[in-house]
Amino acid sequence: MRSGLIIAIFLLIIALFLPQIASTSWGKPLFVKILEAKSRSKIEIGSLHLSWRGPQQFQQLTWTQRNASGAIEELDIRAPLWSFSGPFHLKNGSISIQGIGLILETLSLQGDILKKPFREHAITLRDPLIAPFRLTNIEAHHPLTLQIEPAGFSLPLPYAAEKLEVGRATLNLDKIRCKKGKSVTALFALLKATRLSKDNQMNVWCTPLSFHIHKGIVETERMDALLADSIHICTWGHIDLIKDQIDMVLGLPADTLQQFFGIKHLPKNYVLQIAIRGSIQEPEIVKGPALAKIAALIAAGQLSKKGLLGNLAKPLFSLPEEKEAPPPQHPFPWEN
């Protein structure tokens, strides 16, 4: 009887001081193992301070899971130990998403961890997230930023691309310098811009890129860009993060068609649309239909100069109908 009481008192003391025990150097590994099992990720923690009623405090926390990893200098979760539901405050963190070459760094945000059906959890935002970021293999002339609106945002825990929801986000690239990929080289060949094909790197001016994500599909709005300080293009479409597939449109606006092919008298907002297919890392331009469209435009332009005969033959060489292109975002940064 007495031994049972002693054991009960001992277990009660252990329970009362469990957070303090887990916060010690020899209790931390066990706590980390529990976190790893629940989050299905590899976790390292420099130091931590836990309490039953909160807050829960972590310093120098890193995690790795599937194709994503991150690091946090300080994390405060203002919730009881049994809940971990937030609100939370994160200071100086970074997230790296492999496959799309995106690295967010120096994050500072507040939000909640919401419980979803079937014991799933997700991070939401209370305020807009504005974070500097960098893209691998790209040199930036100005700080790059990502802004994510809180409405519709949900980051699943553990992370799964098919469950990530982003209601609206905007990438601000401004002016960058990057290497020419296969798709850019193919575009230069299509435009017969041999002079621009010699350099391995190029300057790129970009308008802000707005997008949203639903069930692993990124839908991007129109982004205009100036390649190599001379080629105006635009792009929009879909990216499937799950299947690693791109279904995008590369647009050649009227000013580019006039500059490289001498095609005049096009509507100001006309855009010749070229399909981009392939993986995220290696997108490819579908050149065959693009060449046919350009040839039709050139032919139609030449016939318009040949009087009555040209007018009779012109319908035979008219450009196939295009879907209406999204409107451009003026002013373009290179216009300033």
Image: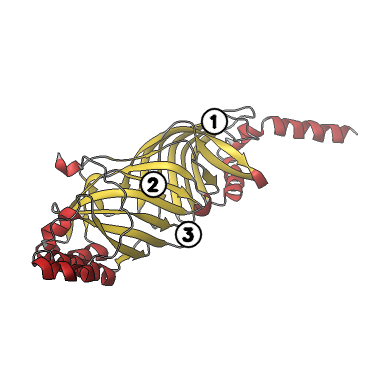
Depth check: give the residue in front, 183 or 77: 183
Depth check: give the residue in front, 297 or 309: 309
Q: Quadrant of the N terminus?
A: top right
Task: Give the residue at mark 3.
Answer: 242
Label 3 environment density (alpha carbons within 10 Å; few <14, some 14–19, many ≥20): few
At horizontal 21% and vertical 70% (from top left) the residue drawn is 317
At horizontal 28% and vertical 70% (from top left) the residue drawn is 289
Residue 275 to residue 5: above or below? below
Numbered marks: total: 3
Report, in whole angstroms, how far the alpha carbon at label 3 lies from the one at label 2: 17 Å
**Residue type at tag 2:** Phe
Residue 209 to residue 180: above or below? above
Are dots 1 and 2 in contact, CB under 8 Å?
no
Q: Quadrant of residue 132?
A: top left
Helix, strand or loop under label 1: loop
Task: Give the residue at mark 1.
Answer: 87
At horizontal 53% and vertical 35% (from top left) the residue drawn is 48
Task: Give the residue at mark 2.
Answer: 211
Helix, strand or loop under label 2: strand
* Comparing labels 1 and 3, the label whose residue is closer to the camera: 3
**Residue type at tag 1:** Pro
